[in-house]
Image: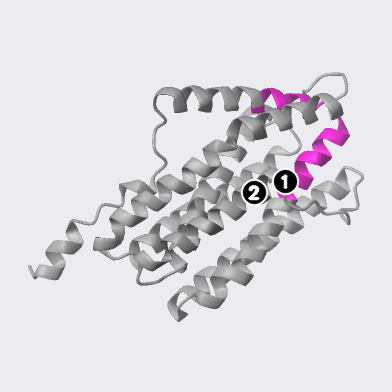
Amino acid sequence: MSGGEAVATEADFSCLSMPQAQGLGAVQARLVDRIKRAALRRLHRSPRGERLLLRMYLAGEDATERTLLEDLLPQSPPWLERQVQQHLADERRHVTLFADALRGLGDDGSVRLEPDWLSRRKIRRWQRLAHRYAAHFEHGLLVPAYATGLCAEQMAQRVLSRHCAVIGTGHELYPLLSRVLADEKAHVRLCENTLRRIVAPHESVHLDLLLKDIRAVDASFGVTGALAMYIAGWVLGGVGSAAR
């Protein structure tokens, strides 16, 4: 075995997996989950609430599509372009699916939500982290872009898994959400594999620190975002049964 091969085997990419929350972090995670589950049940009590949920998903897919077009595609090496194009095609399909679902609920989908104030603040903080860490990687900003993408896809997987569990397989929106969830799981694997390929073994320590900072930003908005969603549930949820 050569020296280079020996070093490569020592690269630790365990940081790519979502860490298990501990202590106060675990308490906060359980609190956020309970609040969001209650908010989802409330929002599903009215067409207005369900339309809001679909608009939120549509806004997220729109933002992801712009990120792929503006941030990842221009700086991707040739071997990554096909992968980014496939990811982009998935996100565009999601946009179409959510827009069609909105029309099915009586919304023409012409009014698109921009990312909310909390999301915009989170994105700005992630962008500052990207520029701070870029110099530590041979591939520069491409690594923070994929690291942020990984965390965003893991968050989407968590959000959609919760939503599917709350509404159950019998709900009319379950096929849509479960289909998008399957794509998000594939996107998580895609980001993990890409980071393993573009991050050199000696850079894995900086990747670990970067991911911790990205996830810390996400967690810092957890309770506030959950409470905002819960309030929206009470405003739009109306009365009646959450079951369909």
Q: Give the range drawn in magenta.
A: 36-58
Q: Is mark 2 on a helix, strand or loop?
A: helix
Tell me which residue sits at (15%, 67%) in the image: 5
Q: Where is residue 203 in the image (x, y as percent from the top left)?
A: 29, 61
Let me know if residue 38 is in the magenta part.
yes
Instruction: Tell me which amino acid carries mark 1.
Output: Trp
Q: In this picture, is 191 found above or below 29?
A: below
What type of secondary structure mainly makes up the magenta span? Answer: helix
Q: How is the image coloured?
A: one colour
The residue type indicated by label 2 comes to Arg
- Which quadrant of the rendered structure holds the N terminus? bottom left
Dot 1: element: helix
- Residue at 46% of width from left, 81% of height from top? 78
Name which residue lies at 77% across and 53% down.
Answer: 114
Identify the residue under disc 2.
Answer: 121
3 or 133, which is in the foreground?
A: 133
Q: Which of 188 and 115 is in front in this view?
A: 115
Is residue 205 shown above or below 77? above
Can residue 190 be spotted in the picture?
Answer: no
Q: Is residue 231 left or right of residue 7?
A: right
**Outermost bottom residue:** 78
